[in-house]
Image (cartoon, rainbow, N blue to C red):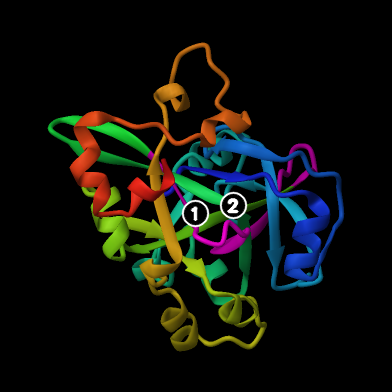
């Protein structure tokens, strides 16, 4: 699954990389959680030249009120690629509302001898990338306020992520540059979309352990230092399998 990621590239770099312009001011994030109820940058299929700020946690159009909206949003941060055309919360968006979720990397946990260890995963090139997502617009009938939201699509883990996220063995659908515009094309079919939602080749990724400040009480993890590699001696042999030794 994917409940934490980072998006800290300068706005002008993101605009250049994704050939789109921000419509609002963006605050860079070194760490963001799915449960913070904040807005983050996405590019949707109806505005492919614009970087918009949407809420993480998809709110289906059929939600009735604010309370139901909050309850559902907490459960829809991720959508399994295998069932997006079946689940009531996602199937309408899967048919016609695709988006790119902009990121620099994401965080996952590895289990070893009963303990969990935090990892940061990014492209070896250290470039920002796009995760396949779905979006929706919902209007609160009581306030007339429109809420635009999104979910991150996950798929089965590639070889690297099977070692890192070794309990769930899932990962976000990271799109290659060549597939980004295909995913948000208005005429993309269901069959074409499902072919896109495959694990990216692990040769383009790198993963390394970080400190436990990511979940430490009273500590704000949204700082550059969260990305500093941190070595756990008990994982030394295991980390060779994900190429971590070159990062220290």
Do the numbered discs 2 and 1 sit on residues whose CB atoms are within 8 Å? yes
In this view of the protein, which residue sits in the foreground, 39 or 7? 7
The spot of residue 109 in percent (x, y) is 32, 40
**x 53%, y 16%: residue:** 219
- Mark 2: give few (<14), some (14-19) or many (20+) Cα within 10 Å: some
In this view of the protein, which residue sits in the foreground, 189 or 178? 178
From where the camera sits, is residue 165 visible? no
Please say if 167 is above or below 61: above
In this view of the protein, which residue sits in the foreground, 28 or 185? 28
Q: Which stretch did the figure color magenta?
A: 119-146
Q: Is residue 211 left or right of residue 69?
A: left
- Residue identified by numbered label 1: 122
- Mark nearer the N terminus (2 vs 1): 2
Instruction: Locate the C terminus and report the quarter of the image it occupies.
Output: top left
Q: Determine the main secondary structure of the stretch shown in magenta.
A: strand
Q: Is residue 49 left or right of residue 135?
A: right
Query: Which mark is on residue 18?
Result: none
């Amino acid at each position: 699954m994917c409940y934490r990621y980072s998006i800290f590239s300068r706005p002008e770099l993101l605009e250049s990389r994704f050939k789109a312009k921000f419509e609002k001011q963006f605050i860079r994030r070194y760490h963001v959680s799915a449960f913070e109820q904040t807005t983050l940058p996405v590019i949707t299929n109806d505005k492919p030249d614009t970087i918009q700020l949407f809420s993480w946690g998809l709110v289906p159009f059929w939600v009735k009120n604010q309370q139901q909206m909050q309850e559902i949003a907490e459960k829809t941060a991720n959508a399994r690629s295998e069932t997006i055309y079946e689940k009531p919360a996602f199937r309408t968006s899967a048919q016609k509302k695709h988006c790119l979720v902009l990121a620099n990397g994401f965080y996952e946990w590895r289990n070893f001898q009963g303990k969990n260890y935090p990892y940061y995963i990014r492209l070896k090139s250290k470039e920002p990338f796009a995760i396949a997502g779905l979006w929706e617009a919902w209007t609160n009938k009581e306030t007339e306020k429109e809420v635009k939201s999104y979910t991150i699509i996950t798929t089965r883990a590639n070889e690297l992520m099977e070692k890192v996220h070794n309990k769930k063995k899932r990962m976000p659908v990271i799109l290659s540059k060549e597939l980004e515009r295909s995913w948000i094309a208005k005429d993309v079919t269901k069959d074409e979309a499902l072919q896109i939602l495959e694990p990216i080749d692990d040769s383009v990724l790198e993963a390394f352990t970080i400190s436990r400040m990511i979940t430490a009480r009273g500590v704000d993890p949204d700082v550059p230092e969260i990305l500093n590699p941190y070595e756990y001696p008990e994982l030394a042999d295991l980390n060779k399998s994900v190429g971590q030794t070159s990062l220290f």
